[in-house]
Image (spheres, grey):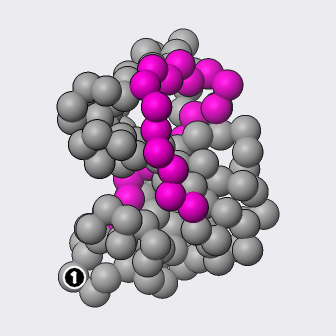
Amino acid sequence: MAQKISGGCACGAVRYETDADPVLMVNCHCRDCQQAGGSNYAPILVVPKSSVNLRGELRYYRIVGNTGKAVERGFCPNCGCQIAARLERLPDVLGLQAGSLDDPSQYKPSMDIFTARAQPWDQLHPDTRKLAQGLPG
């Protein structure tokens, strides 16, 4: 049975919720995620896009990723908090930043991706699956 997942930005202008089970919980170590978040990786909870009820408006920053497809990072235009990520190659899912969850303890990553780009000072969790590059497919 799915648990309710909710979250939002620091100022409260953007809120979301979903009752869908996460498709994937992943730590992304690609350089784009490092720069976007100012940290060693982006902790991302992936859910079906159609299941997310979003209140407020996100502003999106678009880049072209390693696959040649667009990656759009959504953030609150008021406080700048990263909330979501849309992937052109996976249009039916939405990535939610674990730090934006009301209950971040719901985030339990099973995988680290782009570990070839992980920083040498980063301590990868020993129990997660490691992929040197991104997700296959």
Is residue 104 among the parts visible in the rendering?
A: no
Q: Quadrant of the C terminus?
A: bottom right
Whether residue 136 sits left or right of residue 112 in the image: it is right
Q: How many marks?
A: 1
> For residue 87: magenta?
no
Q: Quadrant of the N terminus?
A: top right
Residue 134: quarter of image? bottom right
> For residue 61: magenta?
yes
Residue 13, x across and y down, in percent: 31, 27
* Rendered residue at 21%/35% (across/down): 10
Q: Which residues are magenta?
A: 41-62
Q: Residue furthest right?
A: 137
| Front-most of residues 129 and 118 | 118
- Position of 54 relative to 97 (above/below): above
- The amino acid type, in three-letter code, at marker 1 is Trp
Residue 41: quarter of image? bottom left
Residue 56, x across and y down, in percent: 43, 25
* Rendered residue at 43%/15% (across/down): 4
- Position of 92 relative to 130 (above/below): above
* Rendered residue at 36%/43% (across/down): 77
| Front-most of residues 74 and 102 | 74
Q: Secondary structure at mark 1?
A: loop
Residue 49, x across and y down, in percent: 64, 32
- Position of 90 relative to 42 (above/below): above
Residue designated by label 1: 121
| Front-most of residues 19 and 55 | 55
- Position of 48 relative to 109 (above/below): above
Q: Residue furthest front?
A: 78
Residue 15, x across and y down, in percent: 37, 24
Residue 91: quarter of image? top right
Whether residue 10 sits left or right of residue 116 in the image: it is left
Badge 1 crowding class, 10 Å Cα cut-off, few under 14, some 14 to 19, many 20 or more, is few
